[in-house]
Amino acid sequence: MADGAAPFWRMKGVSKRYGGVRALDKVDFECAPGRIHAILGENGAGKSTLIKIIAGVVQPDEGQLEFLGQPASFKSPAEATKAGIVCVFQELSLMPDLTVADNICITDPPRKFGLIDYGAQSRRAEELLRRAGCTDVHPDELVKNLPLSRRQMVEIAKALGRKPKMLILDEATSALTATDVAKVYQTLKMLRQEGLSILYISHRMHEIAELADDCSVFRNGRHIETFPKGSKSDDQVVELMIGREYKHVFPPKPAPSARPCVLQIDKLSWNDRLHDISLSVNRGEIVGLGGLDGQGQRELLLALFGVLRGCNGTVAIDGKPQRIASPRHAKSADVGMALIPEDRKTEGLMLPMSVRDNISMAAISQLSKVLVVDRAAENARIAEMVQKLGIKIGSIDDPVATLSGGNQQKVVIGKWLMTDARIVLLNDPTRGIDVGTKQELYQLLRSLADAGTTILFYTTDYDELVGCCDRVAIMYDGRILRELAGAEINEHNIVASSLNLPVERNLQPGGAAA
């Protein structure tokens, strides 16, 4: 280990299979106390299986485990937690109908005379929220009333309350704002100083550069290499992850041209979250939604898809006004709209159901004749989507929960492409997706646009706004503050506009002055 530290956790020759798929293949791995150890790899590389074995969620088929120098064999997450191994998974474990304090203290609430001491519980939750850098959430608030970013912070506070010796974070910042991420950085650095061993899974290279002491790369279920942070360039790390030379290139954008308007939004408002939104999106165009997180981007997409009630303003499709009252209406032939949701686990998929059922769900009416599903047509369309999107599956009848995160996201996209939508709304679709899958999705978006699909694309990744979008509409406080096009689309202008500052004109897309 680095600096001669004794291993805190060690795995020797560990393997795990799921049916015919080898998720881990004779893995040797170790980590030390008082260090942040980054786990890198594409979706399906074995990262999730690695941490599930450490956390007692699944059992290895072969190999040896050691924790604090002693043989370890955790038969359940409860055993691992009792030993001091605590996980914060990308899929949250909070109970939405309980309060923040109830969730944080659910396994060991403070008691008085044998009953839960709610005052002490609230104070404990408040202290743990403060330690996690989340002081704007009240302990008595119901979790279901919190946005995803605050729920993620509550999950981190809950983990701290279990007094971990080893903390595992699986894409724990993927739903957070930049401000929240900075607070998590401070918390993790404090825990490192206290001697915790921290395993950190992230696809965001700048987070690895900021936090990690050591990095381990996994590929196809194998441990490829462990090295000190900073000893390899980003490109070298990515090449280890994908096993081939990597070039971060977005598909070329077409030259500007006159195109018919497909989606016209005029003075759309909703409660206190959207204010007089006016925006047009043309056929074959990718328009990005930028701005700091929480400025109304998600609400705009939900309003367009008929999810929100009480919206004012008008929406026209191909010049014809439409009162989109429900998602069913949004995906009808009159509108032809699809929404790729933010959270694939809870909003995009039915995890226990098969790949087949998930991918054909949105288009089932189109695949049915007299209320009977045409299985031949269904199988043909599913096979087409699996091939088109490069979805890695064993069988279309396998539960979608068995797929990696990247392949699950492809199923969500394939589900909506099955409807032959003319307008595609995307809500941060690459969150928690590895670099290789991101490249495939960028290519897919551009090929859809080239074929005439109209795309409205919200992303928290500035590189995606710069590299993918023909125009970028910056949202601020529920309004579209500014539109950027051509050479104006660069990181400086996006950040400046997001903060309601003046932009610099005559800049090249890369940010250099013309």
Image (spheres, rainbow, N blue to C red):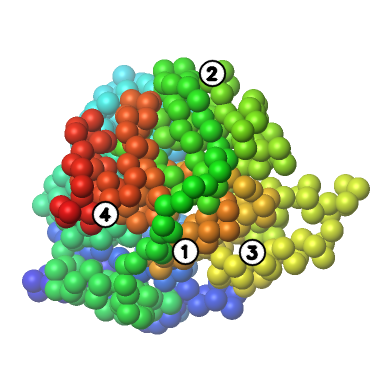
Neighbor class of circle 3 (other Cα within 10 Å; few <14, some 14-19, many 20+) is: many
Q: Position of residue 362 (x, y in %)?
A: 69, 48
Nearest to viewer (mark 4 / mark 2): 4
| 412, 5: nearer the viewer | 412
Spatial CA span between label 1 and label 2? 35 Å
- Residues at badges 4 and 2 in contact (C-beta under 8 Å)? no
Spatial CA span between label 3 and label 4? 33 Å
Nearest to viewer (mark 3 / mark 4): 4
- Residues at badges 3 and 4 in contact (C-beta under 8 Å)? no
Say the numbered circle drawn on residue 230: none
Helix, strand or loop at disc 3? helix
Earlier-in-chain disc, 4 versus 2: 2
- Give me the residue at 34% from left, 37% from top: 483
Neighbor class of circle 2 (other Cα within 10 Å; few <14, some 14-19, many 20+) is: some
Q: Eyeballing the image, is 123 above or below 259? A: above
Q: Which amino acid type corresponds to the residue marked 4 in the rendered image?
A: Pro
Q: Quadrant of the C terminus?
A: bottom left
| 330, 68: nearer the viewer | 330
Neighbor class of circle 4 (other Cα within 10 Å; few <14, some 14-19, many 20+) is: some
Spatial CA span between label 1 and label 3? 15 Å
- The residue where tag 4 is placed is 509
- The residue where tag 1 is placed is 443
Spatial CA span between label 3 and label 2? 37 Å
- The residue where tag 2 is placed is 312
Residue 148 in view in this figure: yes
Helix, strand or loop at disc 1? helix
Earlier-in-chain disc, 1 versus 3: 3
Helix, strand or loop at disc 2? strand
Earlier-in-chain disc, 1 versus 2: 2
Q: Which amino acid type corresponds to the residue marked 3 in the rendered image?
A: Met
| 276, 33: nearer the viewer | 276
